[in-house]
Image (cartoon, grey):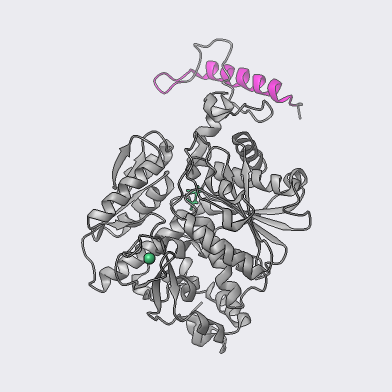
Amino acid sequence: MRPDYFPEDIKPYILPEVRADLYYQCLGCCAQFPVEKLLYVCPECSQVLLIEDKNAEKLKDIPGRLWQKIFDFRRMLKIPALKGIYRYHEFIGPCIPLESIIYLGEGHTPVVEANDVLKEKIGCSFFYKNDGQNPSASFKDRGMASAMSSIKYLIDQGLVSDVIAICASTGDTSAAAALYASYLGPLIKSAVLLPHKKVTSQQLSQPLGSGARVFEIPGVFDDCMKIVEHLSGKYAVALLNSKNAWRILGQESYSYEVAQEFDWDMKDKAVIVPIGNAGNISAVMNGFIKFFNAGIIDALPKIIGVQSEHADPVYQYYLEPDETKRIFMPVDTRPSVAQAAMIGNPVSMPRVVHIAKKYNTLSGHQNVFFIQVTEQAIMDWQLCANKNGHITCTQGGECLAGLAHAVKNNIVSKTETAILDATAHAIKFSEFQDLYFKNQIPQSYKIKSDPDYINLPSLVMPDDPTMVPSQEKRLNKDDFQKFVKDISDKIAVKLNLKES
Ligand SMILES: *Cc1c(COP(=O)(O)O)cnc(C)c1O
Ligand SMILES: [Zn+2]
C-alpha cells in the first residue's frame, strides 16, 4: 500500500525517522563506544558488547497500542528496506538510513501450528516458527542482514572501504555471511572458516556457491572461533560472528515477529530456542524486553533454552541455583546431531547471564529456564515433527525434545502455548536423517534407530531385470506395456490396493 493511503494517525510514523542514537555498551567495564566504527569487544577490557539506544526512554512517548498499529500497517508497505527485519526499524537499527539496508527476503517466517497428533503426544499446544524459510535457510540471516546493513552504512558514509568480512561457523553463519556479502560485491568480500567434516555437505556448498573464500580447519567450532578472534584482533577484517553486537540486534526481530504474530499477547506463552554460541537466546530475550519496556507487549513469555547433553555448558552453569556461586566452565563437546549448536565455549555467555537476570527481574519471577536433552530425544523428536508436517532441522528437534521434557517436569503447563524455533531447514541436516534411517549413526552419538521412524525407499524391479527402460535403449511398445503392468502390480501388492 502507498504511504499516502494510510490512516491519518499512522501516516506520520509509517516511514521511520533515521536518528543516530545507538552506542556500544561493554558488559564488563560498562564503557560506551560509538557504533560508527567496526568494534567487536571492548578495547579496554575485551568483554563482549551490546548495542543500546540513548533514545530508548523516548520510544515510550508513542503508546504501545499505537506501536502495534504502526507495525501492523507497515506490513502493507512495499518498500524493500522495510519488508524484512527493519519493519521494526526503531528497535532494530534507527541509525541506518533506508538506502543502506540490505533486504534479501529475510524475516517474517511462517508460524505453523502443530496438528492434533503432535499436540497429544506433547501434552500442550505449540507452534513452530520456521526460520529455515529464510534466504540461506536458517535464522542467521536475521543477524546477517543487520550486520551487513551496518557495514554498508559505514561504507556509504565513507568510514570504511574494501571490507573483508570473516567468520567461523558451525555451517549456517557462513552460509548467511557469504550470501549477503555476495550481494554486496565488490564492496565486501567474505572468507569463512569451517571445522573440517563438522558441517553438512549442504552447508559447505552454500558459501562455495556464493563465491566466498572457504577454509576448512581441523578441530571443532570452538577452535575455528579462536583463529577468527586472532585474525580480527590483528588484521583489518570485519567480524561477522555473533560476537558482533549487530548480529544480536538483528536477531531480536524474531521476538518482535512472534509478538506480532500472536497479536501482541504474550501471556501464557513459552518460547523455546536451542543454544549453541548463545547469541540467539540472548537476542530473543532482549527483543521481548525491549517490546515490554516500550509497552508493546504487557507480558514476558517464558524462555526455555535447550542444549544437548553432548554440548551443554550453559545448562551446566545454571544447575547451581545460587547465582553468587555459579561458575562458568567451558565443556569439551561430544558429537551431536544438533551440530549447529555443538559449542563448548559460547561467545555470548556473558550476554546470557546479563540478559537472563534482567528478564527474570522484569518478570518478577523465574521466567528463563535451561533444559538438557539426549541425542536420542533430539533425533526422535525431529523425525516425529517432520512426520507430522513440519520441516524442522535437528536443532528444531532439540526444541521439541526440550518442550516434551518441560511439560513432563511442569516447567510448561498444559494451558500454555509454546513457540519453537525451527532454526534451520530440515534439508540442511538431512545427512543425520539418512544415517538414522540406515541405522548408521556412529556410536559416539549414542543414538539407536527406532524401527517405527525408519523410512527407506524400495526399488521396484520387473521380473526380468534386463527389460527396463533406459535413456540409452528405450523398450519397444509391447515390452514397455509389460514393464508398466509388472511394476504397477508389484506396487499395488505392497500398498494393498483394491481394484476400483
Ligand atoms: C547457529 C545455530 C544455532 C545456535 O544458535 P546460537 O546463536 O549460536 O546459540 C542453532 N540452530 C541452528 C540451525 C544454527 O544455525
Ligand atoms: Zn569493557
Quadrant into which the C terminus falls: top right
Kindly identify the residue that appears in the image at 40 percent across and 75 percent down: 22
The reply to whether the magenta stretch includes residue 496 is yes
286 or 160, nearer to the observer: 286
Q: Is residue 57 above or below residue 348?
A: below
Kindly identify the residue that appears in the image at 67 percent across and 42 percent down: 388
Kindly identify the residue that appears in the image at 50 percent across and 39 percent down: 429
Q: Position of residue 479 (x, y in %)?
A: 53, 15
Residue 407 in sight from this viewpoint: yes
Q: Is residue 364 left or right of residue 17?
A: right
- The magenta-colored residue range is 470-497
401 or 140, nearer to the observer: 401
Q: Is residue 449 above or below residue 95?
A: above
412 or 133, nearer to the observer: 412
Quadrant where ligand 2 appears? bottom left
402 or 434, nearer to the observer: 402
Q: Position of residue 13 (x, y in %)?
A: 50, 84
Q: Position of residue 62 (x, y in %)?
A: 56, 85
What secondary structure predominates along the stretch shown in magenta? helix
Which residue appears farthest toward the bottom when viewing the image? 8
Q: Is residue 205 above or below residue 272?
A: above
Question: Could you say which quadrant of the image residue 254 lies in?
Answer: bottom right
The reply to whether the magenta stretch includes residue 57 is no
Q: Position of residue 218 (x, y in %)?
A: 34, 34
Number of marks present in the image shown: 0
Which residue appears farthest toward the front when viewing the image? 325
Residue 256 in sight from this viewpoint: no
